Amino acid sequence: MEEVKILLGERDMPRTWYNIIPDLPLPLPPVLHPATGKPIGPDDLAPLFPMALIAQEVSGERHVEIPEDVRRVYRMWRPTPLVRARNLERALQTPAHIYFKNESVSPAGSHKPNTAVAQAYYNKVEGVRRLTTETGAGQWGSALALACRLFGLECKVYMVKISYQQKPYRRSLMQTWGAEVTPSPSSETNAGRQVLARDPDSLGSLGIAISEAVEVAAQNPDTKYSLGSVLNHVLLHQTIIGEEALAQMALADDYPDVVIGCVGGGSNFAGLAFPFIRERMTRGLDTRFVAVEPTACPSMTKGVWAYDFGDTVGLTPLIKMFTLGHTFVPVGIHAGGLRYHGVAPALSVLVQGGIVQPVAYPQTAVFEAAVLFARSEGIVPAPESAHAIRAAVDEAIRCREEGVRRTILFNLSGHGHFDMAAYDEYLAGRLQDYAYPEEKVREALHVLPQVPQEP
C-alpha cells in the first residue's frame, strides 16, 4: 500500500506568503473610520499594529517574503503532513480520495502559530514590549503566548468566559508559556464593565473580548493588539498551509475537486483555500470551495454583507463583511473558535462572488463526524475542525451514492486534546443542537452602524 502521509523537507518550505487581494473577483471595500465614515489610513491603525503589519494589510503584492527569523521558528513543526485518510475512506465505503492537511502538529496544537509567530516577530522588530489579544476556544491565545515567549514579549489574553470555564487546560497552557489570562467580560476595562452592567452573568463572546484587548492596547504606548483571524495580514500568513498543500498534492499525483475548511473569522479556511483559489482562477479549474460554520453562529448563511464593527462595543474601524451584527452574543457551543459575529472581508467577497459556498451544521452532527474520524484515523479533532470533517464526510457519502470518485481536501486545523469535556457531553447524549433564530438575527442587524454613503 502506498504511503498515506505526503511529507516535504525543511528545504521545501515556502519562502513567500500569498496575498489574494489583487486577485479577488470584486474589489475589497475599504476599511472606514467609525467617526467619519471615510477610509482609514496607516496613522489610524498605528496605535494598534506595527507599521510592517499595516503595510501587509493594504499590500497589493501577490507574494510577500517570509522573514528568515520567522522561517526559523516555523521549522519547529513545518512543513506539516498532508495525509490520505484511507481508513476513513474505507469506513465510509466511498470511492472518494480524502486528504487532510494536519495543522494539529504545531506546539500549540493548531494552525494559529503560523500568524502568531509572524506578528510577534514584526512587533519585536519595532520595539513593542507587550501584545494584547482575545481568544475563544484558547487556540489563538495559546499560539500567541508561545510566539511572545519565543520573541521575548509579554502577552495579555482576554479569554471568552464560557471557554475559560469549559477549557481550563487551554488557560493553563497559555500560563505555562507566560501569558496573563483574564476571563472576558472582565472588570479590568471600560468595555468589560459596560457589558457586565447590562448582563452580570454574561458568558462573553469574541467581540467582547476584542473590545477589551483593543482598549488596553490603545491606552498603552508600549502595547500593541494582535488578532488571530479576519484581517488581511492574518489570512496572508496562513497561506503557507495551502502553498505546502499544493506541492504535496503534486507529489501525490492528485488534485482536489473540493476544498473544505471551518470558518469562525476565516483564517484556517483562507490559509488552505486561497492558494487553490488562485489556481482555479489562473488555470481555469472548476474546484469547489466549501466554508463550514455552526448553525448557532451562522454569519455567512444567515448574516448580511454590510459594514460593521469587528468588536462588540464599537472600538474598531468599520469593515465590510458577512455579519450577524456586532451585538450578537452566541450560545455556549463547544466550538468556541467559531463563535464570532463576522467573517474576514476577503472571504466575504469570495462568498458574495459565488466562489466559496457556505454551509452550516448543528453540533451533534459535527461531533458524530468527529468521533468517526477519531475512530478511523486515530486523531481526536478540535470541535472547530470537526465542522470541516462533517462536510468532507457528507461529500464522500455523496460520491458513494453517485458512484463517482472525487478528491476531497480539508484542513484539520487543530486537535481536540483540550476539548474532551465536549466529547464527554456528546458521548453521554447530553449535547444539544441550537439554530440561531431568524428573529434574533434581524434584531442584531438593526444595530448595524450607519454608513452615510458607502464607498
Image (tube, rainbow, N blue to C red):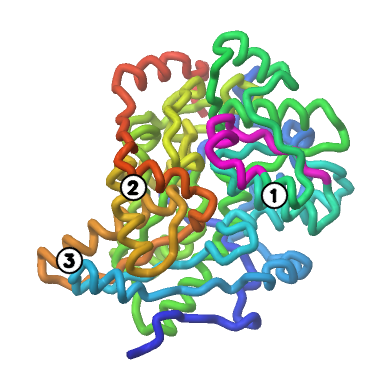
Q: Indicate the amino acid at tag 1.
A: Leu
Q: Is residue 210 left or right of residue 271?
A: right
- Please say if 390 is above or below 30: below
**Where in the figure is residue 332, as x and y percent of width and height?**
45, 31
Mark 1 or mark 2: which is in front? 2
Marks 3/2: CA–CA distance: 28 Å
For the record, the magenta segment spans 154-171
Residue at image position (61%, 39%) is 135
Q: Mark 2 = which residue?
A: 427
Quarter assignment of residue 373 = bottom left
Q: Is residue 49 left or right of residue 359?
A: right
- 91, above or below 151, in the image: below
Tag 1 residue: 144
Contact between marks 3 and 1 (CB within 8 A): the answer is: no
Residue at the image position 46 percent from the left and 73 percent from the top: 82
Query: Left or right: where does residue 6 sit relative to residue 439?
Result: right
Q: Which mark is residue 399?
A: 3
Tell me which amino acid carries mark 3: Cys
- Mark 3 vs mark 2, foreground winner is 2
**Cα gap from disc 1 to disc 2, whole angstroms:** 32 Å
| Mark 1 or 2, nearer chain start | 1
Residue at image coords 43%, 48%: 383
**Could you say whether the residue bearing mark 2 is in a helix, strand or loop?**
helix
Label 3 residue SS: helix
